[in-house]
């Protein structure tokens, strides 16, 4: 084997192959695609030296390594953060960004209310459990009502999410994965450490009216729920405006069990999806920071108009390069449902609940 083929860069390989083909052509092994007078390609003089060969192979290896890394990073760039990554990356890096993003909003108002608390006033915290927290309960009207006092915190909730109030009679929007548990509760009070102070919290069981799934890409990661909790403030179910990249937005939620707001800008607006199920929706991407526990919280305009609910968060391709955990390329994904569709679901559910109550009274 020629030493150039063993140690040389691609220039040497090309020259060797070219020379070989020409020799084969001269003895008639090929059909004459290469003329006998063809001279093999010669590489630059530098790459015929030992130093040049080393440099050439380093360039080849570097190019292949870079291409492999880009292909790998392209595959994982849009994968949501795992729970462990959220705790390590989200709480350590994104939490300070949340408070920093609200600088300048102290003096801003939405109507007659402060913009610093407008979105948060229209949210409630959700507790997700794999077991019932209720020990004693006070019965009240409604099939999903009942003010349940959790007085047995031996096995605390496995997590929390956020619900966005959209009516005064207990209808909320949230993320589908937040209510994908055996027992889900809404509470009026957000504790700094709800795992230890749960005995002082009044819980309201959640009834799921409609829920999407992550298994079907055509369905949004969103759910419509109802409970006996009656919010004193809620967002209006109006058709939201169409925002362009750069428009200001505000989020709110209970990331880490603590209430907070954050702000950012729209980065991208997806197309309007119309699945057969009727769950029409649009997906927005923004750079407003959220962490675990903020899922289900609202994304609103600077004027207080509800766009949708936040469902996931991820970092882009630079997350894995040069200590990417400290970079700023964070993305929040928000599902914006068709308000007419949500309104129809609520009206249908109200009618069904009234009919159930009428039949229950008739049986008595």
Image (cartoon, rainbow, N blue to C red):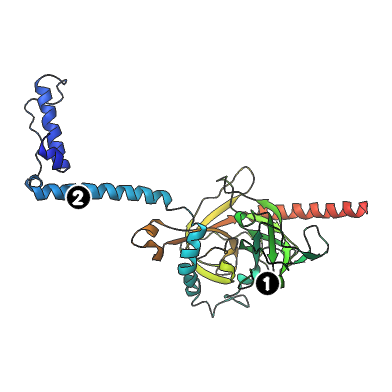
Q: Is residue 288 visible?
A: no
Residue 189 is tagged as 1
Residue 30's x, y, as percent? 16, 21
**Residue at screen point 10% across, 26% down:** 23
Query: Up-down: is 29 above or below 300?
Result: above
Determine whether the residue tagged by mark 2 lies in a helix, strand or loop.
Answer: helix
Q: Nearer the viewer, residue 156 or 247?
A: 156
Question: The N terminus lies in which quarter of the figure?
Answer: top left
Q: Give the residue at the far bottom of this rendering.
A: 107
Residue 58 is tagged as 2
Bin the neighbour count of mark 1 within 10 Å (Cα to Cα): few under 14, some 14-19, many 20 and up. some
Residue 330's x, y, as percent? 45, 62
**Residue at screen point 68% across, 51% down:** 210
Residue 11's x, y, as percent? 14, 41
**Residue at screen point 15% across, 39% down:** 6
Q: Give the residue at the far front of this rendering.
A: 154
Determine whether the residue tagged by mark 1 lies in a helix, strand or loop.
Answer: loop
Residue 47 is tagged as none
Left or right of residue 8: residue 357: right
Residue 28's x, y, as percent? 12, 19
Bin the neighbour count of mark 2 within 10 Å (Cα to Cα): few under 14, some 14-19, many 20 and up. few
**Residue at screen point 7% across, 32% down:** 39
The tally of labels here is 2
- Would you identify the image quadrant in which residue 176 lies? bottom right
Q: Earlier in the sequence, mark 1 or mark 2?
A: 2
Q: Is residue 101 visible?
A: yes
Whether tag 1 and tag 2 are in contact, CB under 8 A, the answer is no
């Amino acid at each position: 084997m020629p030493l150039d083929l063993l140690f040389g860069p691609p220039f040497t390989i090309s020259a060797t192959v070219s020379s070989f083909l020409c020799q084969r052509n001269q003895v008639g092994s090929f059909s004459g695609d290469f003329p006998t007078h063809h001279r093999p390609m010669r590489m630059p003089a530098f790459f015929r030296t030992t130093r040049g060969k080393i440099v050439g192979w380093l360039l080849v290896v570097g190019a292949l390594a870079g291409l492999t890394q880009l292909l790998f990073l392209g595959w994982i760039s849009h994968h949501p953060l795992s729970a462990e990554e959220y705790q390590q990356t989200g709480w350590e890096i994104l939490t300070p960004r949340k408070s920093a993003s609200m600088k300048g909003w102290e003096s801003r108002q939405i109507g007659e209310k402060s913009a610093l608390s407008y979105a948060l006033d229209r949210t409630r915290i959700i507790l997700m459990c794999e077991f019932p927290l209720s020990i004693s309960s006070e019965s009240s009207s409604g099939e999903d009502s009942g003010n349940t006092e959790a007085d047995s915190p031996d096995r605390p909730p496995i997590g929390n999410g956020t619900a966005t109030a959209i009516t005064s009679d207990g209808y909320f929007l949230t993320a589908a994965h937040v209510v994908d548990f055996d027992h889900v509760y809404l509470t009026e009070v957000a504790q700094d450490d709800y795992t230890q102070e749960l005995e002082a919290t009044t819980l309201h069981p959640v009834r799921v009216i409609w829920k999407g799934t992550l298994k079907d890409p055509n369905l949004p990661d969103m759910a419509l729920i109802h409970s006996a909790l009656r919010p004193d403030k809620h967002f209006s179910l109006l058709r939201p405006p169409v925002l362009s990249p750069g428009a200001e937005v505000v989020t709110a939620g209970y990331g880490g069990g603590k209430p907070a707001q954050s702000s950012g800008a729209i980065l991208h607006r997806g197309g309007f999806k119309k699945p057969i199920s009727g769950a029409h929706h649009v997906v927005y991407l923004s750079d407003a920071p959220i962490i675990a526990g903020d899922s289900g919280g609202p994304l609103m305009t600077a004027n207080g108009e509800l766009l949708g609910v936040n469902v996931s968060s991820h970092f882009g391709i630079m997350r894995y390069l040069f200590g990417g955990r400290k970079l700023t390329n964070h993305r929040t994904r928000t599902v914006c449902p068709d308000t007419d569709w949500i309104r129809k679901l609520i009206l249908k559910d109200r009618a069904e609940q009234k009919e159930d109550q009428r039949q229950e009274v008739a049986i008595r």
